[in-house]
Amino acid sequence: MRLLLLSAMAIFAGAIVAAQPAKLIADESIISASNPATLSAFGFFGGTPDRPAGALIPYQLNTPLFSDYADKQRFIYLPAGTKISAAADGRLNFPVGAALIKSFGYPAGDGKLQVIETRLLLHRAEGWVALPYVWRKDGSDADLRVGGTRLAVSFTKPDGAHMDISYAVPNKNQCKQCHVSGDQVVPIGPIWQNMRFMLDADRRRILQDNPALAKLPAEAIWNDTKSGTLEQRAHVYLRVNCGHCHAPKGSASNSGLFLDGSAKDLSAYGIGKRPVAAGRASGDMDFIVESGKPARSILINRMKSVDPGIAMPELGRAASHDEGVKLLEEWIASMPPSAAH
Amino acid sequence: MRMRKIAIASAALCALVQPLIAKTIPVAPGDGAQERLQEALISAVPGDVVELAAGKFVLTDGLSLDVNKVTLKGQGAKETVLDFSGQQGAGEGLLVTSDDVILRDFAVENSKGDGIKSKGADRIVYHKLRVEWTGGPKESNGAYGVYPVESKDVLVDSVIVRGASDAGIYVGQSRNIIVRDSIVTENVAGIEIENSYDADVYDNIATHNTGGVLIFDLPNLPQMGGKNVRVFDNIIVDNMTPNFAPKGNIVANVPTGTGVMVMANRNVEIFDNVLGENGTTNIMVVGYRFEHKDPTYDPLPQNVVIWDNQHGRAGWDPKFRGGAEIAAAMGGSFPAIFWDGAGGPSKAPIVMDTVPALSLGLTDIKADPTTAQPGPLAAATSRPAALPAIKMPEAMEAAVR
């Protein structure tokens, strides 16, 4: 069991050394109204961020949200005796007392992941709460920083280019900005079709509790050309990277641009749609997406920019996602040019 | 299980025993202003006042407020400055997403995107604020100065906005709105009410913008059918700043030298304003003439009523396609009021001002402006019953009294 975990970790997460033996998670820290000042109060990690408690369920996303090329380690915590349920569309529902844990970092010189921050989504009786914890330099613990912070970070992009960026740890409100639906904070990532579990036992346990999940069709993976058509891959990329705000109940509801899968016509997908409140981000272009013309599409212009007045998404974008831009450029270029808009 | 029940109960108890007396959280400029101010805005509880000291707060990121019933106040629009010149993230300077918030007595300078945005923030008060891009009109300035959207009960009172590359004061997809006693200058649009219902715009000064006051309705948005807007007792003069909006924006199409522009709205009243020195025209009523594929959208303006405005000089340099030709045919100048003719005579604005008004006769919403068949728009002798005045909840009026 331990070996399997180790090898899975090596494949998917690289730097996690080993799960800690069953350690008590402080359930009351999750559901209590007061927010612990330090991450150690929860017991999710055995000291350093590379030592997740054995009770955590590690998972990855096939198509992840881009965040300045940071590597992410994701975990689910379920209180003893509770279960995950699932909606018909594959979205997982977690019981009160559950936590979603996500660490962000970059590889250090030795290739080991250096974790900067760990963000928590805690499911309390009154709803989900999002909290950012920033790791101390010595890795001994992480401190709650509700006001967020900025840190200088250096890393190498997949194309080999060296990057120095000002990495932004979001403040508590910014956590909510992405996670809000109506008035509620909700998880974004855990949709069954987009998840990959390091431990097959975890996957099987959830399937056992929710047999209908097995019948859901596989979803395209943004960077795997065999996984789906160009359009399917573009759509899943847009849903994961844009759809949390660009949704009828999301932070960008007023834009009328809906990338969460709810779009009922081309216009709501941005195709042939004029900007509303884009300001200078329109960059002298007429449409969010101009069929056949990525260079004339505001969506591409905003994805390429790192200017806060232009860049989309608005958060976690000190760098632009070259590979994601390329995918969407190909998608737009593949559309027949339309004279109608 | 029993443990958890106890924990939940004690959590609920904690919530109940939170201090009920409102407190003031002071925040001073200086080192760590970003995190200190943001933490104050997060730790505030309903009823609290976050009070900014005088001086310049040098900020690196957008700020946000998500707690109901919080007042954020400074020491004055000159004295307390939130400086976003070095902003590295977020689409606006300050974002408000909670209800019953009062913003007053401070300034926002040089934000990279919008100045102050409030979204889904009902009963918000903007009072004695200044939002400014201090370099004056530039395409690189942020889009909107004051930007309430998707909100009910919006009061903008005694606000100054300068330099917005879109609209100085922009109210979008909202209802029950008052914009008054404010000054908008050197913006592309001074004040814009867009896709909104029930708005009063009065006692404002709009000058040196590209267009003074815009009342617009646009397609493909969650809230459409903009209606019931009164524009009165404003001074809307000398809006001759060349349009500096990036192309693609709807306001990039506003002709330089526009006083009031109504596009595709219903039930708009324009009265008792002082208008003049607007080179294109003082009042323009037009349809939405771009391609769109929204069957639920009505591109035609209707029930626009214009009376008792004072008109100074207008129309000597109309800046829209075909405008110069029409002006030449009319003896060199364009009239102070014109309608594009969208929808034909039944949609004609009711004009009771004493200046000549013109129809361009572009009945077909898809017609090219260069095919205009201008003709006089006859003055009306009566007008329909007036729209009711907009009223804010008393607590909002009390906040600015």
Image (cartoon, coloured by chain):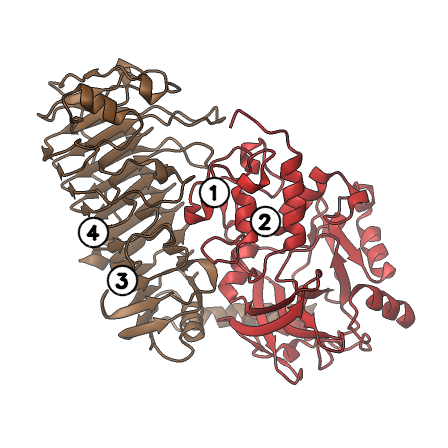
Say which amino acid is labelled 1: Ser
| Chain B pictured colour | brown
Residue A128 shows in the view: yes
Q: CA distance from mark 1 to mark 3?
A: 27 Å
Say which amino acid is labelled 4: Ser
**Front of the two marks 3 and 4:** 4
Residue A242 - label: 2
Q: CA distance from mark 2 to mark 3?
A: 33 Å
Give the residue pinned by disc 1.
A255
Query: Which chain is in red here?
Result: A
Both marks 2 and 3 on one chain:
no
Task: Give me the chain letter of mark 3.
Answer: B
Q: From the viewer's perspective, is residue B366 above or below residue A226?
A: above
- Rendering quarter of residue B228: top left
Q: CA distance from mark 4 to mark 2?
A: 36 Å
Give the residue pinned by disc 4.
B182
Q: Is the C-beta separation of discs 1 and 2 under 8 Å?
A: no
Say which amino acid is labelled 3: Arg
Say which amino acid is labelled 2: Cys
Dot 3 falls on a residue whose secondary structure is: strand
What x and y, as percent, mark residue A180? Answer: 54, 54
Disc 4 packing (10 Å; few <14; some 14–19; many ≥20): many
Give the residue pinned by disc 3.
B104
Q: CA distance from mark 1 to mark 2?
A: 12 Å
